[in-house]
Amino acid sequence: MRRALLLTSLILLVLCVPPLSANPGGTGDANRDAACGGSCHGDPGLSEPSSAILAFSTDREAAYVGGPISVSVTVTEMELSSRGLVGVFLLSDTHGVADTPQDAGWTILSNGEGGATNYAETHVLDAESGATITWSLLAPSNEGTYDFYTAVHHGGDGSARMKISDANTVTVGPVPENLPQMLPWDAMTSRSLGESSELSMPVVNATAVTLEYRIDDGPIASINATLSNDAWTATLPAALSDISLSYRVIMSNDEFTETTGWIVVSNEIQGYSADIFAVRLQSLALMFGSLALCISIQRRMSRSSKKSLGEPEAALISADQTSMVAPMPAMVPPPAVTPGLAFDDPRRPVGWTDEQWVHYGPDHIKQNYGGGF
Amino acid sequence: MIAAATMHAFSTEMLVGSMTFSVVATILCLGESMFEKLGERAQRGLDHAAYFAAIFSLCCIPVVALTGNAAGDASSSPVLVNKMLLSGLCLGLWIGVVHGRRTWGPEMWSNRKMSLFHTVIVCAGYTTAAMLGSIGSVITRGETVGDLFGIWPHFDNAPAISFGLSMMLALLSLTALLVVIFVQPKGEKVES
């Protein structure tokens, strides 16, 4: 009966384990391929379908080879976890390997969240209004038709959820002659607070380059860039607080005007820095200290345990204390057996050995019986 | 190759599993020494189980610390700094656990003070390991089961101790350990 009760309790405990969510705190912005079926969000055994609606849009109908284009993905109507965290993908394929836009030849200048990755996480307060992520891209160097897929990962109602959109086509056409163009460029997407940033932009076929910037969705300010050493340079003013600053580059000549998408700059707030070697020493100090404390108490308790068993005190003193004892006089040869001290003397105490009786017997008789054998 | 983070998760699971086993067996031993319900044979079995699980945990701790060290850069995160500090404390306490059981022998359960002290160190070592796991959980998952307790520390701030002071602390504690090992009279097995 008891065994059955135990087994039933164990089975109940196993069944009571709640469904677990994958990474409720998110995994951070990064370049990621499409989630495969073995992932927490992709495995039908671990996840549930998402009711999210994915809307794809671009700021222009087509891009030129190497030219700028902005892609926006709006996610709405999704289930939301208590954290309201949503991860949005921009993909060039859905195989699970080499699926990022970079794999298809695109350059990501900005993901709109202060980075240049194809996966970005954002918090959503309300599923109705959802979230919009805007990627600023530079087109591949080959003409053609390119597919974009968008995907969303999120939690909700205790399950991991995922949705992938259908393909959205973007055409990359030939570059018109004399079109101002940005050559391959690593856009600045983060910087320290309080530091101004000098941007060097490799723009060709332009007679004027302007740097426009704004704070959040506020008014747009512009700075004229100057040409020096085949690059256009302009200085972006410093941010004095943790604001959302974005900028874009406007390249123009007599015939054309080209504009990049908005590139969002994140602020690197002065981070924590520790001397790792000092930390290792502190860790060692804690280890040695705690170990010393444990061993010390254990040895002390071991000794007091012996003492409580009735062992003579002197036997517990292991240190050499002979120096504390006064020097003994020269050894005197043991006295010969006193004549008349019989081993079977009735005055001999019970338990005394012959040796004790020979040495201490006379004194014992003298003290207790007044002497005389 | 397997990523350091994967090896860290694997070794952590091994550590926490064996440590939990050791703690449960130790607490049962203490209970048996107080209430004498299971019998001497069961207590001896539990004692051995706790002892060998503790030795296995002890072997796992350096692996966990090394793989964790390779998986993240502690110099830029106060949380990881606290993880390193707690790792040292956990290792020290757990060596103390194994040392105590080895010194006193299985008969220590017949001594009330010794069995209580041993159980306290085991629980302290396990709590430290639980804090380490909790920090790892906060880093990777953003939350920890420890939050259910309300008073569970999050270790968002780390002590800023200079290199010189750290060196002095390490030398002092090493000296204390050497004094204890070589000067203090050795402990002996408890006899029944």
Image: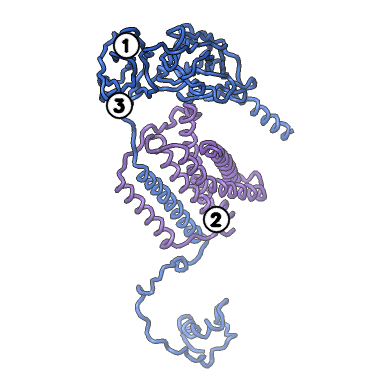
Compared to residue A32, the image places residue A367 above or below, namely below
Residue A131 seen from this side:
no
Mark 3 falls on what kind of element? strand
Pick whichever, A265 or A302, lies toward us: A265
Give the quadrant of residue B9: top right
Q: Please, which chain is the residue tagged with disc 3 on?
A: A
- Residue tagged by mark 2? B102
Mark 2 to mark 1 CA distance (whole Å): 81 Å
Residue B159 seen from this side:
yes
Residue at position x 35%, y 73% from top? A324
- Residue tagged by mark 1? A252
Mark 1 falls on what kind of element? strand
Pick whichever, A161 or A59, lies toward us: A59
Tell me the colour chain B is drawn in: purple
Q: Residues within 10 Å of mark 3 (few under 14, many from 20)?
A: some
Residues marked 1 and 3, same chain: yes
Tell me the colour chain A is drawn in: blue
Give the quadrant of residue A245: top left
- Residue tagged by mark 3? A192
Label 2 or label 1, whichever lies nearer to me, is: 1
Mark 2 to mark 3 CA distance (whole Å): 55 Å
Give the amino acid at mark 1: Ser
